[in-house]
Amino acid sequence: MVRRLLYDKVDWMLGKYPIVTITGPRQSGKTTFAQQLRPDYSYLSLEDPDNRDFAKSDPRGFLETWQDGVILDEVQYVPELFSYLQTYTDLRKRNGEYILTGSQNFLLMERITQSLAGRVAVFSLLPFSYAELQSSEYALPDWSEFLYRGAYPRQYAQAIPSANFYADYLQTYIERDVRQVINVQNLLAFQRFMQLLAGRTGQLLNQNNLAIEVGIDNKTVNAWLSVLETSYIVYRLPPYHSNFNKRVIKSPKVYFYDTGLAAYLMGLRSASELNVHFARGPLFENLVINEMMKKYYNRGERQLFYFWNDSQHNEIDLLFDEGTQRHAYEIKIGKTIQPQFFDGLNHFLKTAPDTHLHLIYGGDTMQKRSNAQVHTFDELFG
């Protein structure tokens, strides 16, 4: 069993708050993680019709029956429960009494903000990080295999071929989650929409062009993007809005929370195909940003990530502030370092001279250049 890096932080917070909430995609390991944290807690899934009916029809009786150490799985199915959780945890004053999990982030966070502010610690558990996987019995030969296979725990634990896993994942996701959040009439069009989004990984998102290709209107594009973000399938990386250059590109970029799913939607069926695939660079970029995100999430921190791109096509793939320090990352899949890899970084340094510059590339040699630190994927995330 893989020990999740988030374990110690959540374990500590269970002693500080009456409720801890764990959000993340379906099958990211939330239930297993919650049961690892507190194996002696009672467990109830609110996807179960009987549990859901009890919680909806008699929330007082439900919380009087289930107290003092309970895991409530997929709690967003009973939004009525949140205000009662506030009342009962205030009354009982027991830290660590409830662990809540949910896979529809916006819906869950809206209820938490309304009812449980100040009473709950919230964490995001994404599928395995590269570091978690490489320290387990499921370690892979290199990052390219990880990029192709993705990070969902079930396919490793059950030795499911990636193509079979993602075919099933997409079918259950579209037929269950999508229809619960939004009324999608044309599921084939929605699947086409996801495939086109995958092909735009790491690109500026042009919603008008996307709408035309799928045959839907812009309002529907917004709605479908929202449901994909709500259920941790994709995220939009915003541009950095600073006065470094007045002609900054303002469209976001789109990325997938799991590169295995993006690769499957693009038609990749083996890791070796990555070497000649048109999107190998954007997929590597997506992988690096995901792993950087997981590094912070697994410490219980939320970091604001951006990219930077001006009208002259000068670009920084990943930009964020850590305390008073600004970090800029250029991401290149090439295994041999080329002088042009540093062009965007050197240009950015002229406009923001206090920035720490980094290059992450697909090779295996670390270097310290005059302006930038060169990282390998394994050195940074292994």
Image (spheres, rainbow, N blue to C red):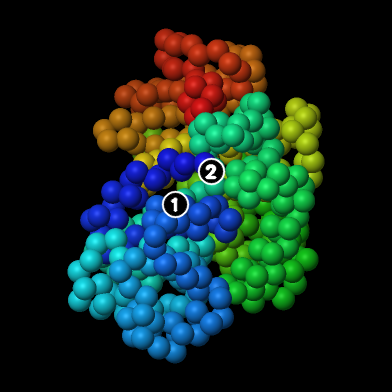
Q: Nearer the viewer, residue 223 or 303?
A: 303
Residue 138 spot, x, y in % from top left: 61, 35
Using the image, tell me which numbered label, if any, was put on residue 1.
Answer: 2
Which numbered disc flags the more N-terminal residue, 2 or 1? 2
Residue 381 appears in the rendering? yes
The image quarter containing residue 55 is: bottom left
| Residue at the image position 51 percent from the left and 70 percent from the top | 45
Residue that sits furthest to the bottom in the current view = 57
Residue 167 spot, x, y in % from top left: 75, 55
Q: Nearer the viewer, residue 341 or 183?
A: 183
Q: Secondary structure at mark 2?
A: loop
**Residue ID for mark 1:** 36
The image quarter containing residue 333 is: top right
- Crowding at mark 2 (Cα within 10 Å: few <14, some 14-19, many 20+): few
Residue 325 spot, x, y in % from top left: 30, 30
**Label 2–label 1 contact, CB within 8 A:** yes
